[in-house]
Structure formats: structure tokens, C-alpha cells
Amino acid sequence: MLAAGAQATCWPLVARAGRKHHPVVLLGFDGVDPRLVERFGRAGMLPNLMRLARSGHLGPLASTSPPNSPVAWSTFATGRDPGEHGVFGFLTRDAGNYLPAIAPYSISPPRFSPYRAARAVSRRQGRDFWQTLDGRGRSLTMLFVPYAYPPPRLRHGRVIAGLGACDLRFTNSSFTYYTSESSRAGKKSRAAGGRIVPVQVVSGQVRTSLQGPWGPGGKPLTLPLVLVVDRRSHQVTINLAGQRQRLTPGQRSNWFKVVFTAEGHQFAGRLRFHLIEVTPDLKLYATPIGLDPRRPALPLGWPGKWLSRSVQQHDLSTVGWVHDTSAVNAGVLPAEVFLQQLLDTMQQRASLLLREISTALPQVTLAVFTGTDRAAHMFYRQLDEPRGGAIGRVYRLMDDIVGRVQSRLPAGCQLVVMSDHGFHPFDHQLHLNNWLVQQGMQVRRRAGQAMKFLRGIDWSRTSAYALGNGQIYVNQLGREGKGTVPAGPARQAVLEKAAKTLLELRHPETGRRPVRAVVPVADRAAAGVRDRAPDLQVAFAPGWRSSWETSLGGAPATGIFAPNPKAWCGDHAASHEPETPGFIACGKRLRKPDPWIGDLANSLLALCGIEGEGRGRALL
């Protein structure tokens, strides 16, 4: 890679008075690791990025603590660290009832009797740099920027929402899987991230339903779904909402448009089906139901006509978590199907981006692709395969997109390519709540019982609990609903004990330490966001993460250590920040040798001749 000090022309820190400001295009590729960029680049797999580097810069981009997407993209947007913008992870908690809540924004589903429409509100503090650009009259296109939600309504721009946009059930992403497998008959119909619906084929037909949002009385709204199963021809005909399509195994349907109605209110959406198998068992996967862009229940972007046309012309999903990792984890969506859908989505988003920059290039274009991150999550175990397996294939598509974009840009246009964080293997889990029990900092009402959502804790004898990715909270008196630990020396003693013992922790078989660092968070946060901050952030060594159960305030009946059995085998959400940088590439040398993701906000403003704010420095 070219080091930051390599000889190359340097962009000005701030454009000179009266100077024409050239357009800027920033391509974000979520989760791209600079070590893999270097490895694949040396193997000749990333020619466009390497060509960009030869005239400028390619190297690490420092991330945030923790290095995960909501935190890092919020720092990208504001130029501020988490202690200022107030997003500390994917989840936070309601201190009153200890339940998990989405950290970057809140989504309230519709309510009935009386009716109240669905609402979305950002929790992020500070001013996003695109608000400054728009306020100063700069034109802007934002395509799928993560956690810019609700999407900003720009006077001088176009926006399509990315991560943050929910599905029609007002969840992050909820699939449906219909199956006649006898092993699933009578089993629970819920899986993490979706529903598994056991069905029976009677006289060549399946009569079932598609579940939509929750309606009056807490009952789900549904639509009849009829499947005509022809096992002789290995075909299934889907009949839903007056639409019909026949599929063969391995085939994906066109979009089905659906409308759920309750008390005179309509909720419009769209979904696709993928037929996995007809014999010996019927296996049919239905995507999460995306909001219909023509009449979305929550904002998806602006302006409305452009948004609808773009979604239709480029065959786009409107669900923010567009790559259905939950269905792969649940064992209902084959990995090869997931990979092909991921590659297709990247191509579809690239086609929209290319159309936008080819027709009316604005002053600033921001486009983010999340497929690189999801591929690393689901295929990290394949990295030792030739050319990096599935991850190498996705990185090659990333490089192809960079090349196609670069070929469309006019002379003088500045191109920046970056990622928000890197990646590590995820082989081992640490059950933080069980560890807290072992340390005497948490007490269960019934010892040795599994726990979900922090239920079953004797709060009168508990000083700490864990929820989210490596986040520990003190059960503080006056802050938590059933707090016991007074602020001051008693609280500090809990923090010091937790940090000390975690850093000393070793795996009993390997002797390795799973924890790299324990970072104080709340004490360093600004007053306006301190109460939502975790007290401690555990930073894990490569190969380790807090457990799946810990994420939602849970724990198994016993045990502290466990292997990770899921298909999701790569991670970064609670990794050590210095070991998990993203990357940055551009055709000019940087002004700063140690770039940080928070520098990009002021860098883009400076390229437009605007003085920035926040603590980031202009790089370009």
C-alpha cells in the first residue's frame, strides 16, 4: 500500500476564495478490512483500487470504540466521537425497565383506537455534515448511507434510506419460511429474525397466510396465501393478493405487492419469494416485506417520485437490512442463495449510482454498499479458500464498482473510497451475564436457570448487568429502575472490579485472554447523552465476542465460555478499536498521516469551501 507520506499531489485544506469546487464522490463499503484489501490487492484482485492508490493514498482509517456500524457511521456523519453524538452501539437499554432498545433511532409502530401513524425519530445528537451542505446550497445525493435515519429531507438533494429503514412489520428485518418438513411440524413458529411456518400439502395445495404488521388488539394482520404444488413438474404456483407466479426450485419471484388493512388504514408493502425445494419437502422462503415507496408507512427518501422510479427501475429492496443474514443463521436460506442475492443487490445499487452520476452529477455524492460487511459476517471461515472464497468474490465486485464509477467521473472530480471498520473471526463467545454471576455482581432469583431480556434477576442484590455487544451497565441507584449502587465510590468500585477481573480472565483450555481492553464510556460522555451510555465497553481479542444471548440481556443456564455455532462467523461489533480499522483510498495524498473516520465530515465540507465543525480535521 502507499503510505500517507508517499509523493503525490495534495488537495487543499480549504478551497481558495473564488475557486470552482469540483464534484466529490464518496463510496462507502461497509466492513472492508485494510488487511484484506492489501492481501487481495497484492494478488491482483483489486486493480482499480491499486490504480487509485498509485496516484494517491491507500491505507487504514481509524474507526470508533466500539468499531461497529451505528457508532462509526454516526461519527462519519457528525465528525464527533460517540461520547458526543450519543450512539454507543446497535442497542441501548431503557434504564427504567432494563429492556433493549435500538440505539441510533426509535421506531414506533402504528397504534389503533385511536389511530396514530408509525413514527421514526433519530436519537443521534449533533449536526450531520449533509445538513450543513444543504443549508449552504450545495447539491447532494445520498444513496443507502447507514443510520442516516429518518432520511433527511434535503432542499438541494436526493436521498434513499439505507440501514435504519424498517420492514412493514416495523422490525429490522423479518423473513417468513414455509416448509412441510416433518421435523418442523408443530415446532415454534418463530426464529431469530423471522417466522418459520409449518405447512401441509393437501391435494396439491397449501392454504396458509402471510403475516404483516400488528393490528388492533395486538393481533397480526394477515393475507391469504395459496400455494399450488406440482411435485411431478417440480413447480409451485404462488397466489397472493390477486397476483400469481409459478416458480421452479432455485428461482426467485418478481415483486408481489401487498396491502394490509385495519380500521380503514392501509399498509402497503412488497416482497419476493425464493423456492428452495419442492420434493421431498416444500421449502419456500419469503423476504421481509419492504415498505412500498409509492406510499410508505415511514419515510424512505426524497423526493417521492424520484424515489419510486429509482426503486422500480433498479429492482431495489426498501428494507435497510437488505441482506438476510438471519435466514442463513436460522438454516432456512442456503448460503449460496444468500451470496447470489447479495451480489445482485450490489449490482442493482451500483446501477442506480451510475445513472445518478452520469445524468446530473451533484456537488457531493455519497453511496454506501453493505454487502461487503454481510459477506464477511457469513463467510469468514472461507478466507483460506482460493482467492478468498465468497469474500474475495465480493471484494472483486467492490473493485469493479470503483472502476465503473471512476470511468464515469469528469476531470477534476474527487473520488474517495472508504470503510467504517475492519473484521475478525468470531469463533468463541463469552456469556457476560453468567460471568457477572460468577463474580458476585449479579444474582438470579433461580440459580442455574437460562435468562432472556434480563428477566429473573434479583435486582436488590445485583450491581451490574450486560446487554448489547460487550456493554456492561452498573445497576445504579437513581438511574436504573431498581438500582442499588450509589453514585460515587461504590459505583467506581464496581467498575474497577469488573475491568480488572475481565482483563485477567483466561480461557481454561487455551489459556488465552479473550478481552483486550475494558473502556470507560459513561464517565467520558457528554452530559446530554451520559444516561444512555454503557458504563463499560468490553473490547475483545480477535476470535472472541460477547455471546448471542448477551446481546439481548440473556444467558444460558450455565457456563461462561462457548463456541460460536452459527453461520455468522466473522465480527467486529465489540472488537478492540486499534485492531479493527477501516480503510481509505483516494487519488490524492492525505494531509494527515493517521486518518480517522470522524475526519471525513470536515474533509467533504472543506472540498466544498465550507468550514467544518466537530473535532475532525480535513484530510483532503
Image (tube, helix red, strand yellow):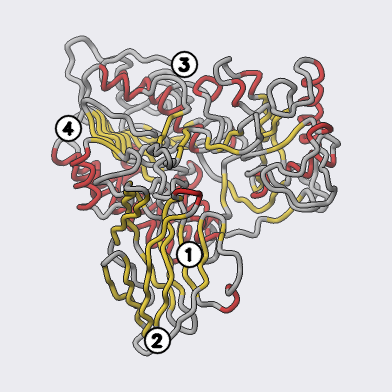
Does label 4 or label 3 sit earlier along the sequence?
4
10 Å neighbourhood of mark 2: few (<14), some, or many (≥20)?
A: some
* Amino acid type, residue under disc 1 in the picture: Ala
Whether residue 268 sits left or right of residue 103 in the image: it is left
Dot 3 amino acid type: Arg
Q: Determine crowd level at label 3: few under 14, some 14-19, many 20+ residues with C-alpha closer than 10 A.
A: some
Q: Quadrant of the N terminus?
A: top left
Which x, y percent locates residue 587? 31, 33
Q: Nearer the viewer, residue 270 or 610?
A: 270
Q: Residue at x 42, y 77 (%)?
A: 206
Judge whether residue 363 can be spotted in this image. yes
Residue position marked by numbered label 3 in the rendering: 615
Report whether 55 appears left or right of 455: left
Where 283 falls versus 170 (above or below)?
A: below
Front label number (1 vs 4): 1
Q: Is residue 499 above or below residue 286?
A: above
Q: Which residue is mark 2?
A: 231
In the rendered picture of this protein, how many numbered marks are placed on residues?
A: 4
Q: Amino acid at mark 4?
A: Ala
Position of residue 411 measured from the top left corner of the image (x, y, whole percent): 17, 32
Q: Give the labeled residue for mark 4.
A: 411
Badge number at residue 134: none
Q: Is residue 290 left or right of residue 281?
A: left
Camera-nearest label, 4 or 3 = 3
Location of mark 1 (residue): 335
Could you tell me how far apart the alpha carbons at marks 3 and 1 are, in whole angstroms? 42 Å
Query: Mark 4 against mark 2, which lies toward the viewer?
Result: 2
Mark positioned earlier in the residue sequence (4 or 2): 2
Q: Tell which of 474 and 546 is nearer to you.
A: 474
The residue drawn where x is 66% and y is 35% is 98
